Amino acid sequence: METTQTILKELNRWLLGQLGERRAVSLPYLGEIGTNLLPAHIKESGGLRTMFPPSVSLVFRPDEFLLDSRHYSSLDLTLPPTLSGEDVVYALSDLLGLPKSVVAETLDAELQELLKALFRGKRVSLLDIGDLFVTDEGEDLLLLNFEPSSSVLDHLNRPFAPYAPTPLKMGVDFKELTHYGENDEGLSLTSLQRFRIVEVEAPQIVVASSVEIEEPTLPDEDMKTLPKEPTMNEEEEMLPRKQRPKSLVWLLLIGLSLLLAGGYWLLFHQKTDSSSLSPTQTAVKDTVPEAVLPADTMPISKEKPAIDTLTITSGRSLYSYAKEYYGQKMFWIYIYIENAAIIKDPNRISLGTKLVIPDLSKFEINPDMRIAVKEAMVWESVIMSKKFTTYEETRPIVLERLAKQ
C-alpha cells in the first residue's frame, strides 16, 4: 500500500513536470493529456478592446476505447491487461529506483480500477489531472466529460499570474498581437471538454500497391461452345495411313531448308557486326544483362506519392489532419515523420507551415488496427521524448518496446 501511494504521488509530480514543459503524455486505451498555449491577444466586445495575457489550458484527447458505447453497457467487461505507458513506467522506475515490473503492475491495477468505475457510471479522477464522468443527454446520447483540475491549471498558468486583462484606450493598439471578435470560436476556453460516445468500428487500413493485379476474365459464352481441338494422336488417326510417309518427308525437307538458311544468315550477320566495330571499341565480356522481372515480381518502391500538401491553419492540429485523411488520429505520427525536417515540436507548429500528407503504404503498418494503434502510441512516446532521429533508425526501437508490452 505504501509503495502504491509513493508511485502515484511521484506520477502526479512527473505529470505536472511534463505538462509544464508542454509535453503531452499518452496512456494506452485512455488517451493523451497535453496543453494548449493561447498567446497574448486582444479581444473586441461591445466596442471595447481588452488585452489578455497568455494562458495555458489542459487538453484531453480520449482514446477510441473510451468512446466505445459497448463498454458502458456490458456486464462482462474484459479490460486490457496493460494500461500504463512505457515512457511513464521507465521514468518512474528511474526516479524511484524501483523495478519496472513493480511500477507497471501498480499503475495497471490503478488504471483498471479507474476504468471499471468510469464504465459503471461513476465520476473518477484521472491521475489527479482532472475528472472523467459520463452524462446521459437523452435520445441515446452519451457524452464523456473531462473537467481539468483547477489546481493543475493554476500551476500551469503560474508564470502569467502577475498579468491581468487590461482595457485598451482609444488609439492604443498592438498590431503584433492577434485580434479576436466577440463571437470568435477560436477563443473558446471552456474548461469542460465533452466527447460523444458512439459505436466504434475499427477502420480497415488499405495499403496501396504500385503493382496492378489484373482480374482473371471468364471466357465468353461463344468460346465455351467452340468444338474441342483434336490432339496430336487424334490428328494422326484422322490422316490416311498412306499419306504419312510423304508428309514426313516434306516436313524434314522444310526443316532442313530453314536450318541452312538460318545458319547462313547468322554467319553473314556476325561478319557484318565484327567488321563494323571501330578499333577504339572494346567488348565487355563480364557484363550481366539487366533482368526483366514479370509483373507479379516487380519490386515495389517505398517512395510513394503524397496524398496531399496543405498549409497549417488556425484551430487545426496533426491529430485533426490524421483523423481527416486516415480515419485514425493516432496516425498523426506518420505526418510528423514525413515532415520531421520542418517540425521541431509537434505541439508548436507555426501557422502557415506547409506539410506533406504521406501515403500510409510508405510505412510498414500492421494490418491489425489494434496493433497498428499500439505501435503509433509507442511512436508518439518516442517522438514526445525527443528520441526520434529517422524512421529507419527509430523503428527498431519502437518494435522492441512494442514487443515488451
Image: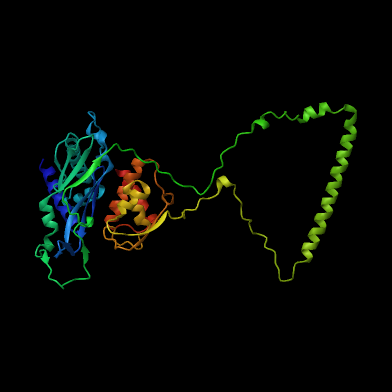
Q: Where is residue 304? Give x, y as percent.
A: 46, 54
Residue at the spot 29% in from the left edge and 55% down from the top edge: 317
Q: Where is residue 44? Give x, y as percent.
A: 17, 63
Is residue 140 or residue 344 the one in the foreground? 140
Is residue 316 or residue 45 the one in the foreground? 45
Q: Where is residue 150? Give x, y as percent.
A: 11, 51
Left or right? Give the position of 117 relative to 86. left
Quarter of the image for the C terminus: give it: top left
Q: Is residue 130 above or below residue 275?
A: above
Q: Is residue 249 above or below residue 349?
A: above
Residue at the spot 32% in from the left edge and 61% down from the top edge: 343
Residue 385 image-quadrant placement: bottom left
Does the rendering let one see residue 361?
yes
Q: Residue farthest to the front?
A: 47
Is residue 146 or residue 221 the one in the foreground? 221
Is residue 262 or residue 348 the one in the foreground? 348
Q: Where is residue 131? Give x, y as percent.
A: 15, 44
Residue at the spot 41% in from the left edge and 55% down from the top edge: 308
Does the rendering let one see residue 82?
no
Left or right? Give the position of 386 relative to 146. right
Q: Is residue 87 above or below residue 287?
A: above
Left or right? Give the position of 180 relative to 163. right
Quarter of the image for the N terminus: give it: top left
